[in-house]
Amino acid sequence: MSAASQDVATRNGIFARAAIYAVLILFAVYYLLPLYVMLVNSLKPLDEIRHGNMLALPHEWTIAPWLSAWSTAQIGVSPTGLKPYFLNSVMMVVPAVAISTILGALNGYVLTKWRFRGDTVVFGMMLLACFIPFQIVLIPSARILGLLHLAGTVPGLVLIHAIYGLGFTTLFFRNYYEAFPTELVRAAQIDGASFFQIFRRILLPSSAPIIVVTVIWQFTNIWNDFLFGSSFSSVDSIPLTVALNNLVNSSTGVKEYNVHFAGAILAALPTLIVYIVSGRYFVRGLMAGAVKG
Amino acid sequence: MTQTRAEIAPILARTRRAPKEVLQDLLPKIVLAPSFALILVFVYGFIVFTGFLSFSGSKLLPDFSTWVGFDNYVRLFKHPNWIVSLKNLAIFSVLYIVICSVIGLALAIFLDQKIRGEGLLRPIYLYPMALSFIVTGVAWKWFLDPGIGLEHAMHQLGWASFSFRWIKQGDMAIYTIVIAAIWQSSGFVMAMFLAGLRGVDNEIIKAAQIDGASTVMIYRRIIIPLMRPVFLSAFVVLAHLAIKSYDLVVAMTDGGPGTATWTPALFMTKFTFGRNEMGMGAASAIIMLMMIFAIIVPYLYSELGQKK
Amino acid sequence: MPFLEIDNLEKSYGSAKILKGVTLDIEEGGFLVLVGPSGCGKSTLLNTIAGLEPITGGEIRINGQRVNDLHPSKRDIAMVFQSYALYPNMTVAQNIGFGMEIRGVPKPERDKAIAEVSQLLQIDHLLDRKPSQLSGGQRQRVAMGRALVRKPQVFLFDEPLSNLDAKLRIDMRTEIKRLHQRMGTTIVYVTHDQIEAMTLASKIAVLKDGILQQFGTPSEIYNNPSNMFVADFMGSPAMNLIPATVAMNGKGLEVVMEREAREPIKLPLASAPAGLGAFQGKKVMFGVRPEALTDPGGADRDAKAVATADCHIEVVEPAGSDTFAVTNLGGKPVVARLRADAHIQPGSNAPLAFNLSKAVFFDPATEQRIV
């Protein structure tokens, strides 16, 4: 390559790279803008939002909207803030995640290491269950919860979330254990270990990564759920997402935008923290959920 | 290949065996059974139940005493709200899938150019995926609100003629939902494509460079064709999210203005629980299920089939 | 009385038959090697002996006891896996002691057994390490330690050396042989490497497509292969199988091999197998190992029947200890093994000595040995 053409190449290269950086930064702004807007406006008095510029930093900083969103804002009929609903969500998420993860791990273990005739069909049916539109099960689920006297309760929501999470948790563990050497299981069988001993002593100690991925995935999905929460909850079991929507979309009274933004960030905080702390596992979970195989 | 697969479950006793050992043999199935039974009832049983409902004259409550045949389906496809929902779904899913894929692929390719700060940019692109659609909806609802949002901000900055009030316009509101949905999901598509790009065998690229191919050529002729499976996965994920789209619509517009942003998922809940048309609601759910299965079943079949 | 008996064993997955009626046995303290190309069913056979895979027919007996339905841990066997299958989350000591732990053996007793075995295998300095911190050879030893510590009635080895590099493989092969001689426990050993089979075995079973091809001592297998597959599979370089015809020449039979552009080679058969008479005027496969086809100076002086013929040498491959020469007979390349210092040029003609007392004949239609 001649010196001249090399020069052109690098100059083109510099332009191209500058353009690439520009596009990448532009998109970073696009993704960050809504978060920025929520954050700065949650720290402004209401007046400043109505008459000022949404993109500007607050003139007068205040945390009053946050306090209001947490403990005093009017949600539905009672001025309780989001606090009780936050607790509802916690009480719903923790057992639902635990149950679906434990069952998923055992299912994955059986489906890979104790295969039987028809296991692919069983797995296929569980996998397909991940993708159904939940509208299809709303009516009968409501009936069953009624029959079980769980309608409108947190345990009812736990049950629903645990069941409809099973497909994904089973998928995650199955794919992980599929790559786990079967010879180890055989060696343990010869050593005389039982079904549960093999699981507890051989597979489980090597399962930390997939457990983290599954827990994060389940936590994010159940925490963020709206459809089941809005369909199966009553006054004292409403989860946070539904409460937030009630707060924002209630048609009465003055729209307290700053409180809405503070509430939205509160609702997003747990999953955002999980994402920031363990982004690598979060992405892996997304991939595992998306790319089957 | 059934020959090499790990079939280690011992056969059931042909001879006399201790009950404890028989239990050990059955244990795997006993462990799997509750989950499978739950899925069988709560997914497949319920689908059948909803299927029956869609042929019944149920209104406020399930009612299996009157059978109306395909009447619910006929009424459904004659109902203007359902037609609007389908039209919106078509607009939404086409734009959502295409734009997410384009942005995702472009960002992935750009990020793949040994970019300084990739470690900072990637999480920024991806964090919306961690948010609830309700939170996304609230953020965009107010950000696009002409009274306080973008339009207001531009006016404050002195651009008095700036106008952006799609969210209040019946014919444009659906596009604001597209914008918010793309914001939420395109980073995830980027991550999928980036993983695909990084998975391409380096030696193939080196060979192409030795053959004198330019960077653009290498992407166009070699890398992107190799990523067909990623395109397929992205399509399936996005399409099924699009058909299920519900929370975001509820949070942003709740179907408004008027019925301008209704989607099938919204139609189902509004008709079933709001208008006491359970039969029609069930019929709309069945249609949604059929749409998703039409995409997912062939995909899963080929994925599971390949592995054998 | 045989110690391990496998009687008409059958195994199928669905409609695919993997083992089609295999019958074998080995005496106590014997070393049985199962050998064959990949997919021949040898590993499946081993797994059925271990009890890791159920069988569809036949019977397995260890020390006279039928074990068909016994759980692997109750068959009194130990197994060394191809991947070693060391538990990654446990130390070397825990790996070796896991089986005893499951059986509830008290800790002092366990520690004593672990110490004994680890000394025997020279891994006592590694006891606190995790498998990921070990080299391939060390992992191999730990895997053997885990098997040895059980003091089983039968050891099962599933291609234990195939993940090691060439030099280590030979060292470990010797070590396994030494351990076997020292402990005298019965061993069943699967390999696809016919040299491993020859060096280790007291009995070899050659399998192909789930059918037992031949079962015998290494020298029987090597010198008296019962069919063309065994003849071709065992030995390196492989036995030359030359298409030929049998003819009567006055007083006796002779074998005739066609050559390109020259008159056929005719070798008189002084001590032909009895069955060969029926093949007069018919095609046969003439089998001769490369070491039975050499330069006249290097031919076995004690051999009863040696015939010499002038051959066209196409390729010469010096291999250090020997020199291999390739000629063409009956339309196929034929390898001869000459002395290292045999002076021979590719493209020239040279006399080659056929040791006919080592030659074998096969029926090309059935591929079976003519006896």
Image: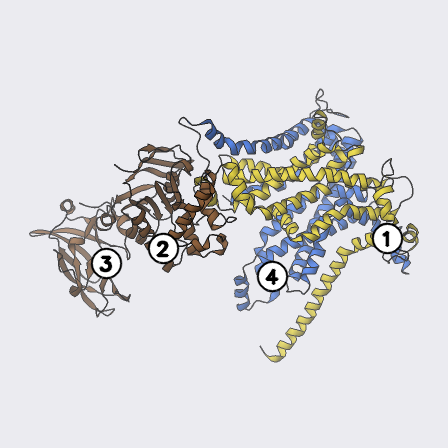
**Chain of the residue displaying label 4:** B
Q: Residue at x 16, y 64 (%)?
A: C296
Camera-side residue of A193 and B259 = A193
How far apart are the alpha carbons under marks 4 and 3? 54 Å
Residue bearing mark 2: C172
Q: Which residue is mark 1?
A: A43
**Residue at label 3?**
C290
Pointers 1 and 2 in contact (C-beta within 8 Å):
no
* Chain identity for the colour blue used in the image: B
Q: Indicate the secondary structure of the residue bearing disc 4.
A: helix
- Dot 4 amino acid type: Tyr
- Labels 1 and 4 touching (C-beta < 8 A): no
What is the three-letter code of the residue carrying label 2?
Answer: Met
Q: Earlier in the sequence, mark 2 or mark 3?
A: 2
| Image coordinates for residue A51, horizontal then vertical, percent | 93, 54
Of circles 2 and 3, the one toward us is: 2
Q: Are labels 4 and 2 on one chain?
A: no
Label 2 packing within 10 angstroms: few (<14), some (14-19), many (20+): some
State the residue at coordinates (88%, 51%). B148
Callouts 2 and 3 in the same chain: yes
Inter-mark Cα distance, 2 to 3? 28 Å
**The colour assigned to chain C within the rendered structure:** brown
Image-quadrant location for residue C185? top left
Q: Give the foreground label among 4 and 3.
A: 3
Same subunit, tags 4 and 3? no
Q: Which of the 4 image quarters holds residue C208?
A: top left
Q: Does the residue at mark 4 contact the one at mark 2 (Cβ under 8 Å)?
A: no
Residue at the disc numbered 4: B219
Looking at the picture, which amino acid does disc 1 mark? Leu
